[in-house]
Structures are given as C-alpha cells and as structure tokens.
Image (spheres, rainbow, N blue to C red):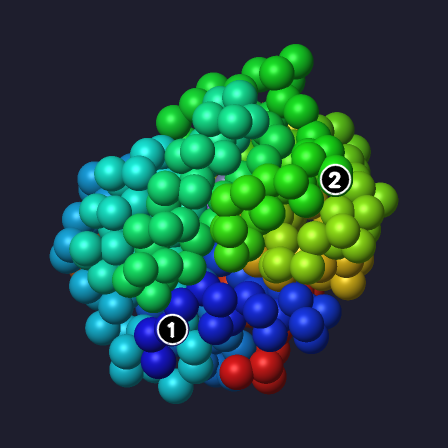
C-alpha cells in the first residue's frame, strides 16, 4: 500500500530498526526494490531525486505509485534532495507521499525558513517532510560541498531546528558522503554524535550517503569492464549500530547503480551477440534485488511490514 514517510519511519525509530530508502530511475530498479520488500515483508521507501524526475517524470512516478498501491507492504514515494519549495510542491502534485527539502547549505535561519514553508504546505496535504541540518561531504545532487565546508550536525542546534521547523524526520551530517568514495579503509561515521542527537531529538533520523559499496561488487564491476578507483562505503555493522541510535531511514543509491551497471556489463561482455533487452536488463534487476535484500537484512526491517 502507498503510505506516507511517517507511517514507515515512526514505527522504525520506535522499533530500533531502519528502513532502506532506495533511489530509482527506471522500471527495473523500482521492481527490484518493491518486489524484494514484498518477498521479505519489509516496509520500504522508494525515492526519486530531481534528476530522476527530470529523466523519468510522471511516467516513472506513476510506475512507483502503481506498484506501491498494489503492493502488500507499506511503500512511500519520497522526493530525495528537493532543492526548493517549488520542487517539493511539484513532487506532492505528482503524487509523492514524502518530500525532502534540502536547504542545509544555507545559513541556519534560512534553512529554518525554507523548511518551515515546506512543512506547512506538505502537512496541509497530509504529506511528511524530511529536512537536513549539517553538510555532508561529497557531491550532493545540486550542491558541490567540498570537505572543508562539510560540517557535522550539532546536537543542540538540531533540537532548535526541529522545534522551529516541525519537520517530521531529520537528515543529519555524521561523516557519510554521497557516491562511491566515502573515505579510506573503514569510512568514518560518527556513532557517538548520532547517539547524542537521538537522546535530544525524538523524531526519526536519516542517514544519507549510506551505500556499503561492497568490495565484491566493486571487483565484479571492474571484471565486467567497469572503471572505478578505490571505492569504499559504510560498514554494515556501523549501520546496524546507527539504527539502534535512532537512524530510521538509510539512503542507498550508489549500490544500486553499481549493481545495475555490473549486471548489464556482464551480459554484454559475455554475449556480444545479445540484443534482447529482457536478457540485458533482467540479470541487472536480479543483482539489484540481491543488493536490496542484503541492505534490508542489515537494517533489520525484514518482517516488519
Ligand atoms: O544519500 C543518498 C545516496 O547515498 P549513496 O551515494 O551512499 O548511495 N541519496 O540521497
Ligand atoms: Ca544538503
Ligand atoms: Na532524502
Ligand atoms: Zn543524499
């Protein structure tokens, strides 16, 4: 069933598990996400960035909405990294049931102002809101935030921000960053900071930049002809710990991108004569389903639907 983000995330925080929020850009990715959620009886959030909306538009949103409405588990359609009030409102008109307003690169007061506007409008239409305080490193969809400008979320400021905006859930900067290169060795995630914030803020917390970038997938990507540097992501154990400390939504995009691309490359490399789209995208869909399954098991959302 199609539900709001609150319907999924409030129980998750209370139950000390996290729910995957997986980015989609086409039918196969959407199927891998929702069919796996149904197989595992897991709630799930399917998210589209502004880039995905540009690429797939209402056609793609309707695929998600239709699968969600027919699904036997709770599914929310979420706007990832909405960059403005207008973008959030447009998504709500498209049928999204959860929207992020990402104004975290603005000064505190402006972030509060922008976020509060979206919260008022979204709540008037029964839609839940994700806001962000603090700055992740790496490339955010519409903002390049370089390391020196990245700053982690201050717990006391988070209390003030939540009170002043009324946001339903809060994305916090805890050391993670978007993309395949999250650091050296075992990328840093500030578990102490998450714990501190969760003691002061009772709404569900959101971790961005949480792909695991598993070494075996990176190797398969290379073996199939992909080129990638020394990519590394967030350790499963760190995400499990974060879920104990109030992280209820975990964003995953890079792992699905690597899985889809690896699946397609392997077919084309193995069978140069292949040009049946079902034979090219089918294995990619299966590999993405495996990635989604692994993440749901790590986050503890299996059987929670
Ligand atoms: O935060 C993300 C995705 O992060 P990854 O690049 O780690 O998948 N989307 O909003
Ligand atoms: Ca941001
Ligand atoms: Na988001
Ligand atoms: Zn993000």
Q: Residue at x 73, y 34 (%)?
A: 154
Specify the quadrant that holds the N terminus: bottom left
Which residue is at the far front? 164
Q: Quadrant of residue 149?
A: top right
On screen, residue 87 versus residue 269, left or right, reads: left
Q: Is residue 254 visible?
A: no
Position in image of residue 276 (x %, y %): 19, 59
Question: Tag 2: Cα neighbours inside 10 Å, few (<14), some, or many (≥20)?
Answer: many
How far apart, in angstroms, are the residues tagged by discs 1 and 2? 30 Å
Which residue is at the far right? 192
Q: Residue at x 60, y 74 (%)?
A: 11
Question: Tag 1: Cα neighbours inside 10 Å, few (<14), some, or many (≥20)?
Answer: many
On screen, residue 133 versus residue 156, left or right, reads: left
Position in image of residue 120 (x %, y %): 36, 51
On screen, residue 191 versus residue 158, left or right, reads: right
Q: Which residue is mark 1?
A: 3
Q: Residue at x 66, y 66 (%)?
A: 13
Q: Which residue is mark 2?
A: 155
Position in image of residue 169 (x %, y %): 55, 54
């Amino acid at each position: 069933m199609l539900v709001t983000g609150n319907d999924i995330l409030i129980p998750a925080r209370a139950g000390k598990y996290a729910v995957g929020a997986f980015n989609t850009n086409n039918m196969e990715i959407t199927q891998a996400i929702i069919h796996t959620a149904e197989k595992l009886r897991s709630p799930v959030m399917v998210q589209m960035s502004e880039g995905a909306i540009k690429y797939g538009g209402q056609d793609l949103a309707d695929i998600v909405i239709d699968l969600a409405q027919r699904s036997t588990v709770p599914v929310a359609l979420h706007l990832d990294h909405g960059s403005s009030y207008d973008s959030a409102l447009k998504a709500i008109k498209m049928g999204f049931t959860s929207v992020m307003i990402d104004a975290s690169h603005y000064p505190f007061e402006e972030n509060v102002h922008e976020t509060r506007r979206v919260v008022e409008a979204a709540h008037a239409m029964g839609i839940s809101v994700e806001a962000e305080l603090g700055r992740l490193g790496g490339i955010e969809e519409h903002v390049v935030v370089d390391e020196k400008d990245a700053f982690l979320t201050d717990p006391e400021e988070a209390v003030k921000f939540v009170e002043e905006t009324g946001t339903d859930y809060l994305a916090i900067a805890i050391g993670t960053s978007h993309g395949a290169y999250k650091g050296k060795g075992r990328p840093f995630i500030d578990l102490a900071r998450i714990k501190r914030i969760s003691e002061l803020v009772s709404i569900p917390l959101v971790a961005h930049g949480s792909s695991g970038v598993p070494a075996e997938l990176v190797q398969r990507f290379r073996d199939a002809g992909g080129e990638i540097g020394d990519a590394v992501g967030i350790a499963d154990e760190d995400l499990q710990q974060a879920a104990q400390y109030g992280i209820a939504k975990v964003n995953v995009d890079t792992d699905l991108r690597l899985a889809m691309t690896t699946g397609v490359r392997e077919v084309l490399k193995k069978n140069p004569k292949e040009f049946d789209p079902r034979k090219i995208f089918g294995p990619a869909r299966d590999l993405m389903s495996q990635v989604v399954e692994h993440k749901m098991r790590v986050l503890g959302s299996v059987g929670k639907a």
